Image (tube, rainbow, N blue to C red):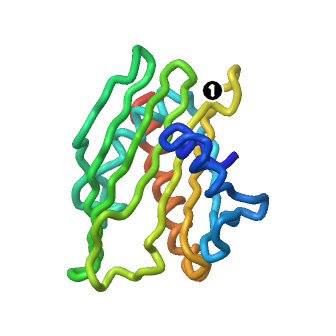
């Protein structure tokens, strides 16, 4: 099951999931115009270390397009679960900018971090093909492992395929930054 589907099941219930289910090719069954791209990375660090590194990822000169990244809401669901909303402002050059909302959930008992981001406002010069949603999850590779699996899915139009190299470059930079932060925290 897609990370996005798990998130929608939690937020909207099973009825929404059935409408937006993703087939094995990564295409949403409800519309052929949208696709789902998936990237994965394994960190050689325990989940707790990766979470600390991830939370300290910004600001970073390699991701200098992220100008603002602040928590705007926090809820303690229970003893083992926290939910956050973060507002992010990204700007490239002077006329390409966007605001996104990140909905984040830390489940400390299961050791699962999930995030969904969506664009809430963008400049007229922001390419419409990048009007995508991200679904991210971090979890231990298995219960006995000190490794963490990072999965990222991007859902958007078929035109996103043409620009996946740019999106993958950002994914790789983000992984590198988290790896460096993990090293800092352990040494």
Circle 1 crowding by C-alpha within 10 Å: few under 14, some 14–19, many from 20: some
In this view, the residue in front, 20 or 185, is 20
Above or below, 78 against 47 in this view is above
At which x and y percent is residue 159? 57, 82
* Along the viewing direction, whichever of 185 and 128 lies nearer the viewer: 128
Among the 4 quarters of the image, the one containing residue 155: bottom right
Q: Residue at x 40, y 82 (%)?
A: 127
Q: Residue furthest bottom?
A: 125
At 34% from the left edge and 80% from the top edge, which residue is drawn? 126
The residue tagged 1 is: 146
Residue at the extreme top of the image, as rendered: 79
Name which quarter of the figure residue 79 lies in.
top left
Residue 164 percent location from the top left of the image: 58, 73
In-image side of 55 versus 94 (left or right): right
Is 33 situated left or right of 78 in this image?
A: right
**Residue in view at x 42 percent, y 80 percent:** 128
- Residue closest to the eye, 102 or 64: 102
Does residue 137 appear anywhere in the picture? no
User: At 69% across and 66% down in the image, what residue appears?
Assistant: 27
Q: Position of residue 65 (x, y in %)?
A: 30, 67
In this view, the residue farthest toward the right is: 24
Could you tell me which quadrant the N terminus lies in? top right
Residue pushed farthest front? 15
Query: Quadrant where the C terminus lies?
Result: top left
Under tag 1, what secondary structure? loop
Number of numbered discs overlaid on the protein picture: 1
Q: Is residue 53 visible?
A: yes
Residue 138: x percent and y percent?
55, 39
Say if 161 sits above or below 37 in the image: below
Residue 36 vs residue 23, the one in the foreground: 23
């Amino acid at each position: 099951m897609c990370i996005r589907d798990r998130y929608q099941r939690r937020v909207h219930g099973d009825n929404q999931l059935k409408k937006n289910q993703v087939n094995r090719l990564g295409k949403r069954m409800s519309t052929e115009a949208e696709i789902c791209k998936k990237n994965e990375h394994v960190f050689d660090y325990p989940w707790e270390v990766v979470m600390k590194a991830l939370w300290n990822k910004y600001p970073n000169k390699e991701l200098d397009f992220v100008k603002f990244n602040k928590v705007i809401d926090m809820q303690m669901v229970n003893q083992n679960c926290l939910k956050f909303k973060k507002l992010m402002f990204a700007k490239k050059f002077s006329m390409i900018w966007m605001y996104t909302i990140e909905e984040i959930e830390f489940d400390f008992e299961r050791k699962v971090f999930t995030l969904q981001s969506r664009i809430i406002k963008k400049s007229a010069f922001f390419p419409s093909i990048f009007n995508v949603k991200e679904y991210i999850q971090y979890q231990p590779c298995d219960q006995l492992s000190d490794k963490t699996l990072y999965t990222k899915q991007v859902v958007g139009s078929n035109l996103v395929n043409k620009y996946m190299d740019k999106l993958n470059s950002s994914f790789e930079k983000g992984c590198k930054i988290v790896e460096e932060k993990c090293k800092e925290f352990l040494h």
